[in-house]
Each structure stands twice: as C-alpha cells, then as structure tokens.
Amino acid sequence: MRKIALVIVGLALASAAVTAAEFGQINDTRTGPYLRYSPGWTLWKGEHPRGGTLHYANRSDCFAELTFTGTQVRLIHKVGPDCGIARLTIDGTAARLPEVGAAECDTYSPVVEWNHRTLLAQNLVKGEHTVRIEVTGHRHERSTNTYVQIVGFDVDDPQWRARSAGQLERERRLVETRLAGYRERCPPVAFVKRHHFRSPGAGGVLICWDVFTPGGGIYTCDPKHPERGEREIFRSDHGVVFDISASYDAGKLLFSWMDLSEPGKDSFHVYEINVDGSGLRQLTDGRFHDVWPIYLPDRRICFVSTRAQSFSMCQDAAASAMHVMNADGSDIHRIQFGTLADFSPHVLDDGSILFTRWVSSQTLATVRIEAASEGMA
C-alpha cells in the first residue's frame, strides 16, 4: 500500500514551524524542559502571547507542571482584570516566590499585560526540578474571574552554557544522524502552504471569520530526495486552502478551498485531486462552508459544514456539524447534532470517527456511523 504524510505549513510571511509550546517543550529546548497540563486547560492562539499561544483555566483542580534542569525559572503569564490567584510548589513542596515572599501569585491587574514575568525560583540545587502551578479558584476582590493564563517559562541552566564546543558538535552530529534516519523512513509528503490565519482565529467556527489571506497551494516532496525539491499540484493565488486529507491508497487528496478574489462572496468547498495534480473536481458548492474532508473506509466522505444552519452559542458565527456524502458529492446528510461546533474528524482503526467538539472548551468525542451499501459510488 502506498503511503503519504500530510503537513500544513506557513508561507514565507509566517513561520513554517509549529511553536515549541505546542509540543510542551518551551524556550531553550536544549535544556530539555517538559511541560504538562492537566485536563481542564484551554489552548488559545493569538498574536499577543510570546510564541502565539497560551493556556488558560479557572477550575481549582487544574495544574501545570514543568520538569527542567536548571537553577532558576520564571513564569511567563498574562495578567489582567479577569485573572486569579495561582499557587506554586517546587519538587512537591510549597515554595515562596522570591519577589513576594508567598506561595501564591495574584495575577490580577487592572491593565492587561500578555507576557508578564514572575520569578518562581532561584539558586536551586543543580539537577532536575519540577515546578507546579495550581489554579486556586480564588481571586483579587477587583478581579472579574479566577483565570490563570500561562504563556510559558524561562529556564536558566548554567550547565548548558558551560558545555564545551566539542560536546555541542557531538550533539549536532547525533541530531543530524537521527534526522537522516527519519527521512529514510518517511514516505512522500503532501503539504499546504498558506498565510497564518489572522485574529480572532479561535474556537471551532474559525471558518466563518474573515481571517484568511490568499496565496499558497498544495505541494508534494520526497524526504528521501530533498535535492528534487517540492512539486506543485494545486496553486491558490486568489484563494486559500484550509486543509488536506489523503485517500487510503494515497492516490488522491481531499481539500477545502475558498475563492478570495471577491471577499465575502464565496465559501469553503470540498475538492478532490490526484497526487500528481490531475483530476481536479469540486464536490460541494453553495453558501455553506465545507471543511475538514476525510475519506471513510466505505469510500464515502465525512466533512464539517455550516449546513447545520444554526448559530454557535459561544461565538459570533454559524455552528458547524459533521456531515457525510458519497464519493461523487451526492446524498449529503448530517450525522452529528450539537449546539456549538464539531471539527477536525479522524477515522479510528475500528471505523468510528474521533472529532473535536467545542463545548465551552475543546473536548474529544467519537461517533460511529453505519457503513454504506456495497455498491455505493
């Protein structure tokens, strides 16, 4: 069976790399810090936090843990009129913040500051440490909520700065060797180039907001032969590609695209194309947004659409729900019902569909649908 990997990257105007915070490794990744969030946190993306992301929570059972090697660590976080009080522990013991002399940090401020720096610990014993930030559910009397909003951490590791150039060179060679092995095992890659989405760009109804910039397209490359470069299979000068999905035999790609030559006139529609760039055909049309198409094992296509014709209860946009259609775009019908937004479906090994649902925060859910009859197109 043929294989193909899928990637979505930014254009030259925006970083093509995923921010380190999304992998849990932050700031100077050479020191090996690892960040873990408990259930209950929500990832928010925007232009103000350092790195473009922050996690927020206001439930008293929520915590974040950073394991790192170093002697000093600072918390980078948002302060503002809706922020609450956080509690600090280091290596399992309540610790006093050096700058305030207490184990609790009040993140309230009448004025918003997105990347406030709070010293959590200094002069730690050399070695590995774990810092835990807990949401207390308490707040300053003037605060409107109890949110703790974490942007990241800064870790000071003198041991790293003291490493010899020879050791750094050995590590560099080790990384290159590992990357060469990864490239050898990696199948051909199909990827999207596009500009980053502008603000607000949050939640499951992103597709309804005017946050898109034309440009980019769909490309393929073979990691085993980087000298061959990339191959363009769909160009999008006057529109935007939202996402792509490969067929089970890796011979076709589904994607959603919107024409931006007349802003506000078009919607995202589902298209199909062969991986060699031939056979382009449009599968959906109309005034609704149709995105996140994926192939089902029975040859039908599942996708997310605003055909629900209702409004999200949390956001200023139309709600979205999962739909199914035949391979030729016929017999479109809804398979999941909710009041907010369902998005990013993925077929599991047992045939059920894993998807993300926005219900005050992003949650995961599954749904199983009946297979189509044997002769369905």
Image (cartoon, helix red, strand yellow):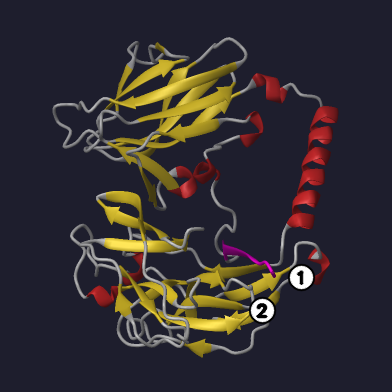
Chain part drawn in magenta: 1-10
Name the residue beneath numbered marker 2: 232
Residue type (three-letter) at the residue carrying disc 2: Glu
Residue type, label 1: Gly
Q: Is residue 308 shown in magenta?
A: no
Taking the spot 34% from the left edge, 14% from the top edge, the residue there is 103
Look at the numbered discs 2 and 1 and tell me whether their residues touch, using CB distance below 8 Å.
no
- The kind of secondary structure element at disc 1 is loop
The quarter of the displayed image where residue 186 is located: bottom right
Left or right of residue 11: residue 221? right
Nearer the observer, 99 or 311: 311
How far from the left and from the top, in percent, is residue 310? 19, 71
Secondary structure type for disc 2: strand
**In screen coordinates, is 30 left or right of 54?**
right
Q: Is residue 237 visible?
A: no
Q: According to the image, label 1 marks what residue?
A: 229
Does residue 369 show up?
Answer: yes
Q: Residue at x 42, y 23 (%)?
A: 132
10 Å crowding of disc 1: few (<14), some (14-19), many (20+): few
Which residue is nearer to you in this view: 207 or 367? 367
Residue 231: x, y in percent?
71, 76
309 vs 17, left or right, is left
Q: Which residue is depicted at the point 72% across and 72% down?
A: 230
